[in-house]
Image: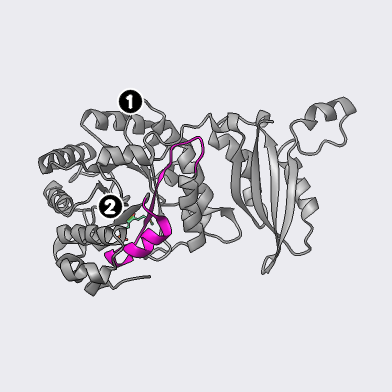
Amino acid sequence: MSEVIAKYRLFDRNGNFEKKAEGIALGLTIGSWTDLPHLEQEQLRKHKGRVVAIQETGRETAEGREADVTIAYPSSNFSADLPAILVTVFGKLSLDGVIRLMNLDFSNDLAKRFPGPRFGVKGIRELTGAYGRPLLMSIFKGVIGRDLSYLEKQLRAQLEGGIDIVKDDEILFENRLTPFEERLKLGQQVIAESGKKALYAVNLTGRTSELKEKARRGIELGATAYLFNVFAYGLDVLQELTEDRDIPVPIMAHPAVSGAFTSAPHHGFSTELMLGKLVRMAGADFTLFPSPYGSVALERNAALKTAEMALEENMYKPTFPVPSAGIHPGLVPVLYEDFGIDSIINAGGGVHGHPNGAAGGGRAFRQAIDAVITGRTLEEAAKQHEDLRVALEMWGTGK
Ligand SMILES: CSCCC(=O)C(=O)COP(=O)(O)O
Ligand SMILES: [Mg+2]
């Protein structure tokens, strides 16, 4: 049967979960129906949500007893797009009471209607030429109010440091000093001159109706990747971009704004559903999310599950997990331990704040990555590598 199965976390002081679950299954589908004639009841029955399971977790919270409730919704109720699906499973329900949408499972026929990443981990490794290790990404920092020459200097230093992917900061929008087209052209020119295979993810911004045209124009100018603030626009806008044959480059999903939907413990969406599963279905090749130990820390379990959903084997190519925020070279061992080889180490301040500049910051990260994949400690590696030694002295090691 074609359906989407939603798993909710519910809270109730009286533990009246059966009644609540039935109310949801009915309320989000056919509504009140019992007064209708028998024939109409029969016709409506196939559209009704079905309570699949109710499992109390045994936890008592300030919001009451906690239970996981699973409800299936027939695909015949909605069109095969994320706006319709999200409104079906969590539309008005998200406004009603203490409830969190933890996960969604799609039957195969429905899942096939979504693109998933175009490149996946393997494709991104081919584009960057980086194999056998986590990739290294850095972020332009402090560029608002600066001109192209400043950007150029930062880019050259980052490339010299051995960075695989450089991305705009998500807060860099269309502006007079570093307009989209100019920084894109500059970026491609500097990368070409460096002789490296690095990608530059330019922030694709502006009004929704202008995005595709802008992205296509960027491709004509040589764009190799885009950064996209998906949660300010919506998942379907991401999908529109990733499905467009005239935009054949990887798209990086930035988590800005997502905290408004995912951070409350008893409301909203689980982080892993939004930043792991749904951005992947919508076609993101990279998903950025806060790491468990940086400056914007995400609860460890949520961060691990996000990476798991981005990578787990299914009909889509895997999305590269990018645990981010406040990352410095001393965190590389724990990042590697938690997120493994198919992940991206991403840093802004941890690259640019290095006393030897962004080139030194990049080198320190690469030295740390080389150390972990060859089974050496950072302290050992730092004896041979000055940039790493300086980074450890500055930011320390571990969590
Ligand atoms: C919250 S995850 C996104 C990370 C990000 O956009 C960023 O700018 C991180 O910068 P940092 O200097 O903390 O590495
Ligand atoms: Mg940022």
Residue 70 magenta-drawn? Answer: no
In the image: residue 395, left or right of residue 190: right
Q: Is mark 1 within 8 Å of ligand 1?
A: no
Viewer-proximal residue among 209 and 199: 199
Tell me residue 286's x, y (percent).
38, 44
Where 166 falls versus 224 (above or below)?
below
Q: Which residue is rendered at x = 17% and y = 65% of the image?
A: 387
Give the mark nearer the N terminus: 2 vs 1: 2
Tell me residue 26's x, y (percent).
76, 41
In the image: residue 50, left or right of residue 89: right
Q: Is the C terminus in the top left, top right, bottom left or bottom right quadrant?
A: bottom left
Viewer-proximal residue among 307 and 133: 133
Residue 324 magenta-drawn? Answer: yes
Residue labelled with disc 2: 136
Amino acid type, residue under disc 1 in the picture: Asp
Tell me residue 372's x, y (percent).
30, 61
Segment colored magenta: 313-341
In the image: residue 172, left or right of residue 255: left
Amino acid type, residue under disc 2 in the picture: Leu
Tell me residue 165's x, y (percent).
26, 47
SS category of the residue bearing label 1: loop
Viewer-proximal residue among 151 and 389: 389
Which quadrant holds residue 205?
top left
Residue labelled with disc 1: 246
Alpha carbon separation for disc pair 2 and 1:
27 Å
Q: Is the N terminus in the top left, top right, bottom left or bottom right quadrant?
A: top right
